[in-house]
Image (cartoon, helix red, strand yellow):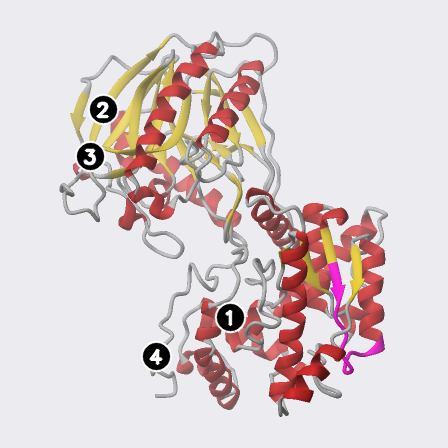
Amino acid sequence: MPTLRLALCQVNPTVGDLAGNSGLVRDWTRRAADTGAQIVAFPEMMLTGYPVEDLVFRRSFVAASKAALERLAADLDADGLGALPVLVGYLDADGPPQVSGDAEPGRGARNAAALLHHGRIVATYFKHHLPNYGVFDEDRYFVSGDALSVVRVGGVDVALTICEDLWQAGGPFAVARQAGVGLVLCVNGSPYELNKDDVRLPLVRRRAAEAGAMIAYVNMVGGQDELVFEGDSMIVGADGTLLARAPQFVEHLLVHDVELPAAGEPAAPEQELADGMRVVRTEAGDIPPAPTGPAATGGIIAPVADEAEVWQALVLGLRDYVNKNRFPSVVLGLSGGIDSAVVAALAVDALGPDRVVGVSLPSQHSSEHSRDDAAELAKRTGLDYRVEPIQPMVDTFLANMSLSGVSVENLQARVRGVILMALSNQEGHLVLTTGNKSELAVGYSTLYGDSVGGFNPVKDVWKTLVWRLAKWRNADAARRGETPPIPENSIGKPPSAELSPGQLDSDTLPDYDVLDPILIGYVDGDLGRDGLVASGHDPAVVDRVLRMVDTAEYKRRQSAPGAKISMKAFGRDRRLPITNRWREDG
């Protein structure tokens, strides 16, 4: 049986940076070549970054993607890497955009992958299954491909597929079995959500059984707006055996030697097979010789615990949002409470303390222990700590306006927002907001106050998970012999906005241990009132919570973006009308 040395490049592209992404391909192909690799694969839409969203409709961008692919093929050859077959995702089009007046049936923009070899594009594959759920809108952008590309590489028939092709039964993987391939290369832009890694391996095993072939799955890593890609690239044998698995949330070169069945007699260049798909066959030609010496073993990295996984996702999402958008630093309000403490710790982990400014914004209602907890966190993390009392500004407003009750509470929050935005304008920081998913769900925030900011690291984190993350982060620091970043007082004290005397969240909200399960069922699970009551929740509490969620949609629509970690994040996943009279209680 032939042996191929596979190199899966789990890398971090940036949307729209064609030159930078091409540079990544060249650099990592060189690294792969230095290991003796004989075929290299990069993620879905590697050249353009993913997802490109409505950039698909710009013909100039499509043309630039195609031109960049041609240049990349020539540059790899000029780099002395032409003999190494390189699979790269990119944006293609064989017709006008589907939204244009001159659109043609069956033609348009394509989510594509190309095999580059000896300075040429030797094979092209167009994604067949186009996801149109959750964060995906690919039916809006792309036209489905109807041909499976099979390339003979080093005496092995290799099929090319893209991401969603793996998640759907039938189609390319069923056709791969009929085509008798030995290896399926699947390039991916598969976004992270908690426990998705537990689903992915069984899925790859099912597709391996369906194709009767080994699968090499390469996923991108990095943050793109609300999405985080965690990598988790892997190689799975035709019998379902996990052969190699990359770590999560870091760039990684996974190199592994695989034994594959030799290709049979050359078949017709084009065949019509199942599901209306064709097989288009090409041959790559000479590739680098098989390396001598010990076999390359990629190793198997075990997934980490839930809290560690989420923390890494949030850190990566924040880091890439800040760095890819070229912000020099971030600023946030430090209240001494759990949410701002967790956001501050995430920011320091993501950017380093020199790029994080924490501002204590005490009012007359701010407790001494909260001020002390904010200062203690700053001391533990080493961030740039400042104190800006808001009471004189609040008093100036109240001297000129007659306000009372909730209006005064909201005024305090808005004064804090003005100060943070002023520091942002003056010093160039990105403002981080700190409201968790539970608060966003029930509208427990002040528009243009504590909701002000350009990015929210905990937007998709339920309050009960915020506490778990804080405890995990402190325990992890202690395990490594470091100072836990979050003061125990911030974790242990009852949550409060401290906008009025003696105020607690529990004055207006159910306890979070009661609230979060209802919200998870309603928001993430789309359960209605009856389903929630049948699950054991108190009907009166359910009615109260659902009213708060339904009437807060206008607030959520104006909230800052934040990294998605759940199956249904606010914004890209959960899309409901603001003007909406439907209520679950009828």
**Distance from Cα at disc 1 to Cα at disc 4:** 21 Å
**Distance from Cα at disc 4 to Cα at disc 3:** 43 Å
Type of residue at label 4?
Asn
**Distance from Cα at disc 3 to Cα at disc 1:** 41 Å
**Distance from Cα at disc 2 to Cα at disc 3:** 10 Å
- The residue identified by callout 1 is 520
Is residue 526 depicted above or below 350 in this figure? below
- The residue identified by callout 2 is 280
N-term-proximal mark, 3 vs 1: 3
Type of residue at label 3?
Met
- Say whether residue 584 is magenta: no
Q: Residue at x 84, y 75 (%)?
A: 369
N-term-proximal mark, 2 vs 4: 2
- The residue identified by callout 3 is 277
Range drawn in magenta: 358-368
**Distance from Cα at disc 2 to Cα at disc 1:** 46 Å
Badge 1 marks a residue whose secondary structure is helix
User: At which x and y percent is residue 295?
Assistant: 58, 16
N-term-proximal mark, 2 vs 1: 2
CA neighbours of label 1 inside 10 A, class few (<14), some (14 to 19), many (20+): some
In front here: 81 or 426? 426
Type of residue at label 1?
Ile
In the rendered structure, the answer to whether residue 236 lies left or right of residue 437 reads left
Name of the residue lying farthest toward the front: 400
Q: Is residue 470 visible?
A: yes
